[in-house]
């Protein structure tokens, strides 16, 4: 079984941990953005949920999914556990890979000659730290409400609209989501590199794919605070 330990300790193993946890986190941000598009849907006119906002009905469903097989919020907690494990693994692998590269070059280059990969990995490290801070703020703002001045438990539509009506809150979200876009782009691109998909035939497609996915998630997420600030929603 020592090959597992060897793989875990190798740079390739750490990059694999980063890629797999990155795919999980990437899948989450994509689904989260798609789910949040319900912010644009008007209140139900009739039926069981008449008068309710689809975003709130969807949020209620997320809490109940898996019932009655699983106890209250059971499936949601399973998703949360997978996310927490993915974040810890991703940060751990990033830290290990960064440490290895600092050890390989303890003193900075005398002549500042920054190649693209060097620039990208620095952006990834800073971007990662910014995203971690943003996620902590975001949870306190829209999940638990301590960082929200007018939080109503269960009324997700209200919490989002009231939250983004404060211009500087929207500014934080827009800046963090632009950082997320860069992180997704560089992350996807370098994941393909680690996987060895560098054949000339694939190279341009790799970039198009990374750009397309980063742009879709970023445009979707940035649109929410912009829609509230411009009065399109609310
Ligand atoms: C403008 C963009 C975003 C909006 C409007 C938004 C909205 C929300 C809302 C309303 C909740 C609470 C849902 C509920 O209580 O049912 C939530 C939870 C959450 N969001 Fe976001 N979000 C955005 C961006 C992001 C980003 C970029 C990330 C990750 C990098 C993220 C990660 C999370 C996480 C981890 C939760 C907690 C889910 C849970 O455990 O219940 N969100 N978001």
Image (cartoon, grey):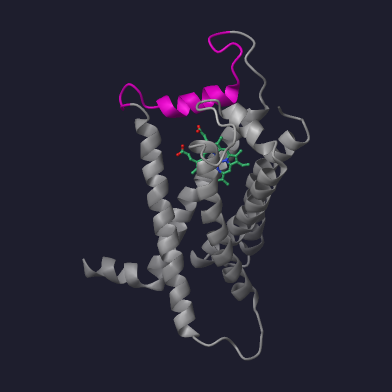
Q: Quadrant of the N terminus?
A: bottom left
51 drawn magenta: yes
Q: Place residue 190 in its image quadrant.
A: bottom right
Residue at screen point 60% across, 75% down = 118
Task: Tell me if 90 is positioned left or right of 226 in this view.
Answer: left
| Closer to us: 106 or 153 | 153
Give residue 104's position: percent from left, percent from top: 46, 84
Residue at screen point 33% across, 71% down = 9
* The furthest residue to the bottom: 110
Picture layout, residue 40 above or below residue 124 = above
Give residue 145's position: percent from left, percent from top: 52, 37
* The furthest residue to the front: 149
Picture layout, residue 146 above or below residue 133 = above
Picture layout, residue 219 above or below residue 107 = above
Q: Place residue 226 in its image quadrant.
A: top right
Residue at screen point 57% across, 65% down = 126
Where does ligand 1 appear, by image quarter? Answer: top right
Q: Find the magenta span and give its range.
A: 47-71
| Closer to us: 112 or 22 | 112
Residue at screen point 61% across, 13% down = 51
Q: Place residue 130 in its image quadrant.
A: bottom right
Q: Quadrant of the C terminus?
A: top right
Residue 16 appears in the rendering: no
108 drawn magenta: no
């Amino acid at each position: 079984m020592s090959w597992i330990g060897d793989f875990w300790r190798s740079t390739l193993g750490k990059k694999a941990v980063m890629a797999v946890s990155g795919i999980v986190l990437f899948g989450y941000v994509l689904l989260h953005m798609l789910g949040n598009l319900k912010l644009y849907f008007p209140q139900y006119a009739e039926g069981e949920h008449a008068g309710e906002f689809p975003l709130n009905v969807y949020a209620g469903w997320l809490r109940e999914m898996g019932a009655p097989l699983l106890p209250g919020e059971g499936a949601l907690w399973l998703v949360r556990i997978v996310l927490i494990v993915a974040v810890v693994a991703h940060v751990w692998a990033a830290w290990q890979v960064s440490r290895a590269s600092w050890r390989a070059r303890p003193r900075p280059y005398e002549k500042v000659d920054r190649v693209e990969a060097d620039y990208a990995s620095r952006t990834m490290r800073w971007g990662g730290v910014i995203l971690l801070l943003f996620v902590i703020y975001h949870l306190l703002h829209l999940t638990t409400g301590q960082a929200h001045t007018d939080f109503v438990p269960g009324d997700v539509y209200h919490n989002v609209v009231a939250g983004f009506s404060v211009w500087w809150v929207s500014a934080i979200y827009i800046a963090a989501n632009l950082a997320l876009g860069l992180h997704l782009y560089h992350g996807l691109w370098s994941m393909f590199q680690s996987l060895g998909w560098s054949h000339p035939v694939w190279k341009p497609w790799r970039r198009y794919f990374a750009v397309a996915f980063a742009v879709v998630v970023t445009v979707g997420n940035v649109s929410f605070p912009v829609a509230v600030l411009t009065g399109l929603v609310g």
